[in-house]
Image (tube, grey):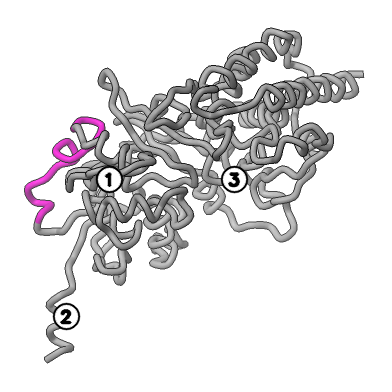
Amino acid sequence: MSFLAGLRKKKIYILMHKDIPVLEAVYDRETSRFTEIREILHYEHVPYSARKENEEISLKRLNHWFRWRGIPGYRVGLNTLLGRLGVKDPEELLNEYYALSVSDHYWLVESEEKKDLSYEDVSFFRHSFDQNGFGRAMFSLGRAEIQESAKKTPNNVLAGYQKKSWFRQNGDLYLYKGGTFPYQLEPVHEKLAAEIGRRLGMDFVDYNTTVYENQVVSVCRNMLDENSELITADEVLSLKKPVKDQFDYYSYIDILKEKGIADPEKLMDDMLVLDFLMMNTDRHNQNLGVIIDPDTMEWKKIAPIFDTGTGLACLRKNEEVKQWPEIYNYRLFNSNKILDNIVCYLIDDIGRYDLSVLDESLLDFYREAMMKHRAVSGIQQERIDSQTELLAKRIREFKRLQQKACR
């Protein structure tokens, strides 16, 4: 009887991509895992990283993709967040509202319930959500009374280490993202990176800073909408079998070219230059990628540069910033310890950048950005001075490398 009872408990779900049914599967809400794929309905909309040869699907990779979309177990303030929302782990949140995101257009629904629903009925691009409830649950430093509605937001499907939350302002979605105490410099660095990108004519996500729940946060408008979605570098690289001992950068460029992306080297150059100037240490495969059309699955363009906050030695002690070495380890694709001066040799056309725009006014911009929320961050003048000097050193070093390459 227990075996038969177990069979009856199996529930069939449909993974949807907007209004396109992708696959039918048995899904276990207790473990937040697919346990069996019953039928592939539209293979061309199966997540890239879950695909196998001969139009088959890897159950293991499908579950990895699905889980990776959610809040990670290493999120800052995770235990407080879970306690306030009344759930035991972040995976449980994937079941709260169709596993809906605003970074892609996939959603998961029971087959019986699907008969009465369309994507337009549930999409967070069209419908409001309890943004303040989740925002307080995520960011509040004091006591916070949270309603049940706070669990039905796109924040359930939002990866990343730092505290973060989506808010709707004037009809658009904006992401608030925190920084590391005490100085909370990552949000400031997102703003600085955007300013450098603006001066150098790059395609970038524009960031500003504000204070939310007595914490400094970066604020950026969602780069995606109902007609676009992000596929990460991880998903891109899943399309090509890795070559042993080969740096994935070259495979990534090859795939982009095969998919019709114009000038991939030029756009990747911009990211490498910005990362060098910012001393970015966290360019992992989830914070770069490609924007596609979810209806046609056409690859449109490389995503604007985003997530450049963890740089300029922001996690180091005051004395370490002053003594920071000229060369440091840079994380990129399948290398966690590539020297940053070596990265410069990947830049295809280093001479096209007009570095005269990185002048004293940029250093003033950085100083003012650090001082803007000084009452909240408590950052000291000594730290502001050493951070500014570190940026000046990076600009001088990049100018030197450019001159050397152009001789």
**Residue located 18% across and 32% down the image:** 127
Q: Secondary structure at mark 2?
A: helix
Q: Position of residue 17 (x, y in %)?
A: 28, 45
Q: Which residues are magenta?
A: 113-127
**Residue located 26% across and 34% down the image:** 132
Judging depth in this view, the residue of 143 and 174 nearest the camera is 143
Q: Amino acid at mark 2?
A: Leu
Q: Amino acid at mark 1?
A: Leu
Reply yes or no: does residue 125 show up in magenta.
yes
**Residue located 16% across and 58% down the image:** 110
Q: Decide: few, some or many residues near mark 2? Use Cα within 10 Å; few <14, some 14-19, many ≥20.
A: few
- Gap between marks 2 and 3, in whole Å? 41 Å
Reply above or below: 400 against 291: above
Q: Secondary structure at mark 1?
A: loop
Task: Tell me if 28 is positioned left or right of 301 in this view.
Answer: left
Q: Mark 1 or 3 closer to N-term?
A: 1
Which residue carries the number 1 mark?
A: 100
- Which quadrant of the view contains residue 389? top right
Residue contact between numbered discs 2 and 3, judged by CB atoms under 8 Å: no
Which residue carries the number 3 mark?
A: 284
